[in-house]
C-alpha cells in the first residue's frame, strides 16, 4: 500500500492552446473546475512544470502538474469522468505521444492496484515511473508517496529518472 494511502492523484498535461480556454495551463485549470462540477474536488495541486515532449520532437513544450482530488466515485467512474472531460474539451486520441489539448491520467487511487479490463483502470498508472512530468510534481505534492506495487519511494523514482528528460518548474 502506498505511503499516501487513501489519496487520489491525477496527472494533468497539455501542450496545445485550447480555442475556448486559451493556453495549456488555463485549459487544465478549467478542466479541474469541470471535474469539480462532476463530483471530483481539488484537494491540492503541485507546482506547474514545463516539460519537453517525449520522445523529443518539434512539438510545443507541455504544461504539467499533479492534483490530489477527493471523490466518492469508484475508480472506474472517476476514470470515465476524466475521459468525458477530455472529450468535452476536444481531446482526440490519435497516435501515441501526439500533441494534445488536454491529458488527464489517473496515477494512484487510494493505493489500490488493478490490472485493468472491463472498464477498470490499470492502477497505479502503468507508465508513471520514468516520466519526469509525473514523478517530479508528484514528489512535490506527496513526498512520502510509495509505489503501491513495487514499494519504491517517490524519491527513488525521482533519482532514477532518465537524465535526458527536460523539466522546469514554473
Image (spheres, rainbow, N blue to C red):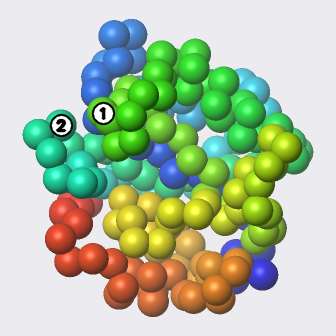
N-term-proximal mark, 1 vs 2: 2
| Comparing labels 1 and 2, the label whose residue is closer to the camera | 1
Residue at 27 percent across and 54 percent down: it is 54
What kind of element bears circle 1?
loop
Q: Are marks 1 and 2 in contact (CB under 8 Å)?
A: yes
Image coordinates of residue 146 in percent, x first then y, are 62, 82
Residue furthest out toward the top? 20
Image coordinates of residue 117 in percent, x first then y, are 80, 49
Q: Nearer the viewer, residue 168 or 158?
A: 158
Q: Which mark is residue 130?
A: none
Residue 122 visible within the image: yes
- Circle 2 Cα neighbour tier, 10 Å, few/some/many (<14 / 14–19 / ≥20): some
Residue at 45 percent across and 82 percent down: it is 157
Q: Is residue 19 shown above or below 83?
A: above
Residue furthest out toward the left? 58
What kind of element bears circle 2?
loop
User: Would residue 90 be found to the left or right of residue 162 on screen?
Assistant: right
Q: Is residue 129 shown above or below 16?
A: below
Residue at 24 percent across and 49 percent down: it is 53
Image coordinates of residue 159 in percent, x first then y, are 35, 87
- Circle 1 Cα neighbour tier, 10 Å, few/some/many (<14 / 14–19 / ≥20): many
Image coordinates of residue 24 in percent, x first then y, are 33, 31
Q: Quadrant of the N terminus?
A: bottom right
C-alpha gap between disc 1 and disc 2: 8 Å
Pointer 1 residue = 99
Q: Nearer the viewer, residue 56 or 107?
A: 56
Pointer 2 residue = 60
Amino acid at each position: 500500500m502506498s505511503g499516501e494511502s487513501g489519496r487520489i492523484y491525477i496527472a494533468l498535461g497539455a501542450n496545445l492552446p485550447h480555442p475556448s480556454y486559451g493556453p495549456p495551463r488555463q485549459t487544465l485549470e478549467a478542466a479541474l473546475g469541470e471535474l469539480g462540477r462532476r463530483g471530483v474536488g481539488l484537494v491540492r495541486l503541485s507546482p506547474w512544470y514545463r516539460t519537453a515532449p517525449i520522445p523529443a520532437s518539434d512539438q510545443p513544450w507541455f504544461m504539467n502538474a499533479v492534483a490530489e482530488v477527493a471523490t466518492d466515485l469508484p475508480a472506474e467512474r472517476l476514470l470515465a469522468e476524466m475521459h468525458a472531460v477530455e472529450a468535452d474539451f476536444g481531446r482526440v486520441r490519435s497516435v501515441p505521444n501526439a500533441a494534445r489539448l488536454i491529458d488527464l491520467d489517473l496515477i494512484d487511487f487510494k493505493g489500490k492496484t488493478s490490472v485493468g479490463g472491463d472498464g477498470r483502470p490499470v492502477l497505479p498508472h502503468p507508465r508513471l515511473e520514468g516520466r519526469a512530468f509525473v514523478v517530479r510534481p508528484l514528489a512535490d505534492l506527496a513526498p512520502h508517496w510509495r509505489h503501491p506495487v513495487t514499494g519504491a519511494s517517490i524519491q527513488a523514482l525521482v533519482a532514477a529518472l532518465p537524465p535526458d528528460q527536460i523539466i522546469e518548474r514554473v
